Image (spheres, rainbow, N blue to C red):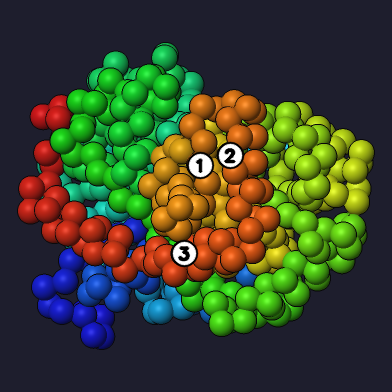
């Protein structure tokens, strides 16, 4: 038993394909890096499982070999791997599943040429290895908490090949959908690689338009499902956002919960952020202006923007993130006197269009292709407003970071953006940002103009900033909801709607 934990605390195996600070491509890593520590503070005996990537190996983390020659069936093959142990900053054990040919690669999931051809094999290995390892260390976890398609096979394994295994008889599975748009699709001919029985390949099993979907495996076989915001839990049950899975999700609605992601304020707080040249809080907002000036100098934007509105966008550059809308309003936004700073990478079409916009007005528009964690902090601190015009957004974390930094979000009213941003009312002085609903450039431009009008009223703008900086989206409340859900499903495991 871990020090400081109650004998009655739930044991949870937290499986994710990425987690900060060990490996990251997006928001999943932020959640998987922060939530386990919050759960531990709530008294949960939580352990994390991750693949041992090259970036993790080179990260300088303190590790120790834990288990050698772990034998993992993969189709007709029996592969051997190793398990390495490290810990989170608050002492949560992290088990790194090592198999050099599968995970010692330049990137986590793909190259510039596309996804790795053997991603099914890679994450089938990880999923099966995690269960085999649980048996080896003798911990019959109350709950195995799985995240996104990369771990979707775990609930399927528990309901098929491990169904009659007494070791897992009281183990429940929870599957969290971070983004339904990423479905883990593979050829049906690879079903044997998964070590699943052939009878799971049907409409109400893992079959999805003639292919295997690992995300659907998690949706079908998990004892309970969560999404990362209440609004997104409702949206994915509709044709607009369900990606063809809305019917199956409706059938699972009694076991589907929306729990808003939280924010790690030990990392995202302007008063103690080591990435900022000038830390600040509500008592010295003039330092925020100094961060803006420093950002303009760093990106070689016009000094005149010190007294003009500066918009920031930190995002994957894609239509889903609303880049199509931003491209269409860019000229008008610049014409109104604003500056725009963009950090991200993604679809070549939008990278090229946004680079062209920056080339046309290098004094007003700056774009940096790629991801730079340090620069992201400086943009959030230095910008006046944050743009998130997403077509859909399961939760979003950047708008929560922006609020704490006194940077006003302008967002589309969808998913977690709708849950966290309250439209500012200049009469009552209530609200923390600006929202628009139709996914159109006209609706976005209307919201931007509302924001610009308030920006020109310094006293009202300061009230708006203050409202945002006082918001609390820390993990504690959300972690307690997970603890309650763990208790519920661990009392009645193996109860999905197919049985």
Of callouts 1 and 2, the N-terminal one: 1
User: What SS does tag 3 mark?
Assistant: helix
Residue at image point 34% right, 40% down: 231
Q: Residues within 10 Å of mark 1 (few under 14, many from 20)?
A: many
Residue extending farthest bottom = 3
Name the residue at the left extreme. 491
In contact (CB < 8 Å): disc 2 and disc 3: no
Mark 2 to mark 3 CA distance (whole Å): 18 Å
Q: Can you identify the residue that label 2 sits on?
A: 447
The residue wearing badge 3 is: 467
| Quarter that holds the N terminus | bottom left
Q: Residue 77 got which mark?
A: none
Q: Which mark is residue 435?
A: 1
Q: Are marks 1 and 2 in contact (CB under 8 Å)?
A: yes
Vertical position of residue 262 compared to residue 341: above or below: below
- In the displayed structure, 299 sits above or below 7; it is above
3 or 1: tag closer to the N-terminus: 1
């Amino acid at each position: 038993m871990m020090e400081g934990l109650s004998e009655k605390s739930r044991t949870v195996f937290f499986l994710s394909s990425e987690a900060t600070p060990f490996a990251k491509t997006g928001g999943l890593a932020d959640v998987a890096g922060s939530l386990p520590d919050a759960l531990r503070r709530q008294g949960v005996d939580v352990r994390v499982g991750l693949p041992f990537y090259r970036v993790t190996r080179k990260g300088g983390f303190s590790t120790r070999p834990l288990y050698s020659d772990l034998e993992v069936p993969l189709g007709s093959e029996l592969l051997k791997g190793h398990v390495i142990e490290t810990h989170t900053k608050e002492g949560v054990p992290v088990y790194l599943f090592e198999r050099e040919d599968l995970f010692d690669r330049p990137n986590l999931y793909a190259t510039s040429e596309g996804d790795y051809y053997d991603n099914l094999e890679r994450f089938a290995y990880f999923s099966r290895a995690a269960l085999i390892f649980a048996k080896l260390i003798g911990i019959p976890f109350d709950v195995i908490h799985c995240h996104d398609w990369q771990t979707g096979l775990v609930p399927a394994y528990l309901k098929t090949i491990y169904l009659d295994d007494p070791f897992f008889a009281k183990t429940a599975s929870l599957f969290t959908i971070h983004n339904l748009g990423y479905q883990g699709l593979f050829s049906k001919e690879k079903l044997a690689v998964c070590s699943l029985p052939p009878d799971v390949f049907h409409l109400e099993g893992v079959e999805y338009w003639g292919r295997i979907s690992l995300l659907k495996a998690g949706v079908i076989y998990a004892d309970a499902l969560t999404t990362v915001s209440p609004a997104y839990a409702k949206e994915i049950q509709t044709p607009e956002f369900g990606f063809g899975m809305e019917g199956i999700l409706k059938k699972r609605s009694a076991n589907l919960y929306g729990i808003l992601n939280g924010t790690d304020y030990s990392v995202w707080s302007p008063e103690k952020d080591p990435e900022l040249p000038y830390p600040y809080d509500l008592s010295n907002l003039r330092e925020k202006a100094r961060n803006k000036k420093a950002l303009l100098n760093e990106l070689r934007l016009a000094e005149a923007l010190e007294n003009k509105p500066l918009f920031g966008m930190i995002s994957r550059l894609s239509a889903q993130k609303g880049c199509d809308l931003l491209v269409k309003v860019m000229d008008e936004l610049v014409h109104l006197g604003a500056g725009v700073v963009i950090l991200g990478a993604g679809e070549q079409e939008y990278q090229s269009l946004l680079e062209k916009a920056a080339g046309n007005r290098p004094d007003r528009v700056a774009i940096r292709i790629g991801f730079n964690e340090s620069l992201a902090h400086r943009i959030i601190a230095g910008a006046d407003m944050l743009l998130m015009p997403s077509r859909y957004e399961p939760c979003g974390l950047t708008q929560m970071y922006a609020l704490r930094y006194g940077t006003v979000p302008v967002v589309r009213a969808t998913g977690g953006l709708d849950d966290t941003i309250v439209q500012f009312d200049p009469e009552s002085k209530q609200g923390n940002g600006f929202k628009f609903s139709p996914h159109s450039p006209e609706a976005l431009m209307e919201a931007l103009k509302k924001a610009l009008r308030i920006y020109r009223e310094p006293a009202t703008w300061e009230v708006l900033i203050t409202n945002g900086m006082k918001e609390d989206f820390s993990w504690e409340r959300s972690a307690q909801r997970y603890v309650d859900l763990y208790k519920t499903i661990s009392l009645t495991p193996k109860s999905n709607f197919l049985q």
